[in-house]
Amino acid sequence: MAKLLVTGGAGFIGANFVHHWLRTYPGERVVVLDALTYAGNLANLEAAKGRSELRFEPGDIRDTALVERLLREELIDTIVHFAAESHVDRSIHGPDAFIETNVQGTHSMLKAARTVWLKERTVSSHRFHHVSTDEVYGSLGPDDPAFTEQTRYAPNSPYSASKAASDHLVRAYHHTYGLNTTISNCSNNYGPFHFPEKLIPLMIVNLLHGRALPIYGDGRNVRDWLHVSDHCRGIERVLQRGKPGEVYNIGGGAESENLTLVRTLCAVADAAFRERTDLAARFPAAPAARGEPSASLIHFVQDRPGHDRRYAIDCTKAERELGYQAEVTLAQGLRETFTWYLDHEWWWRAVMDGSYQRWIDTHYR
């Protein structure tokens, strides 16, 4: 039975992974380490509260001594490293935090794992899995083939540069010290518990409030969308079948221009308001509450610096070696995600405090 340390396990993808693992492997120990910064929220783990298999430890991944202590105390044999600063816009306005968390924090984790697993040999086998992003590969043209694991790194933002650096550190610790590592590079995630500064949850919350739906530039930037449940299944496959030292791309196979995505989400909202009579009373400012199209809120804003034009993931290696395949279509995923936000209004209202809204107003006006 595996004993997992999940860093960033109170964040969006990390919390979804924790719930997935506890459902799939009941009785296996899961320790969550999270600093509970703005995007980390204990409410994300509320459904697992009280389970004896789960331990939450507040703390910073840069605290090497803390990580070493947890590895020893719990006899951890598997690290799933989600913890990261991940918002491109924030990295443009404040890159220091991204270097400190994503580069220095990952190095701290690697040092702790090397000390406890390789020098002290507390467990007979181990795995350090590092969760990364397709943004390390840079930007694609409209006719370019999708990113593979052999694509040259070409990060274009402080965020993607910090993730590229952390990927290289993980690779180096495998090749230099023999640490059993794997890396996965995923496409854009969406789904439950997604902090509402990212595109899909921001659009959902704004259209429910009748606020502008800000779209950068001409809206023609393309992303490959991956439902978070598929991402969790992909990581599970890497842990089970992935070869030490290897990299696996995990994508959703669902490319969409941002403008098309937002229009689709608006259509989902309009349909929901027609089907559920309670929504007009709950969200009277939404255009759909008055029978008007949500797409009327679409508003184009100045493009951000260095905005990558297109991302696309080639999952052939993960499909061939791991048996991975995305199961959630984009249309299905958007409907389910919109419904989740309707049914969890308490969650997103709790995370959207005044300081967060001021930041959104400043950077998306």
Image (cartoon, rainbow, N blue to C red):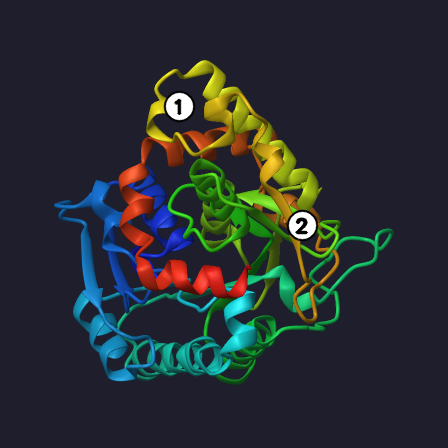
Residue type, mark 2 in image: Arg
User: Dot 2 corresponds to which residue?
Assistant: 223
C-alpha distance separating marks 2 and 1: 32 Å
Residue type, mark 1 in image: Ala
Residue 205, percent from left and from top: 44, 42
* Label disc, if present, on residue 280 of the rendered structure: 1
* Label disc, if present, on residue 20 of the rendered structure: none
In the image, residue 205 sits, relative to residue 280, either above or below, namely below
In the image, residue 176 sits, relative to residue 252, either above or below, namely below
Residue 1, percent from left and from top: 28, 51
Q: Does the image show residue 81? A: no
Residue 342, percent from left and from top: 37, 32
Q: Which circle's residue, 2 or 1, is located before the other in the chain?
A: 2
Please give the name of the residue rendered at 24% of the width and 83% of the height, measured from the top-left corner.
Answer: 65
Quadrant of residue 162 within the rendered picture? bottom right
Quadrant of residue 332 within the rendered picture? top right
- Left or right side of 47 for 7: right
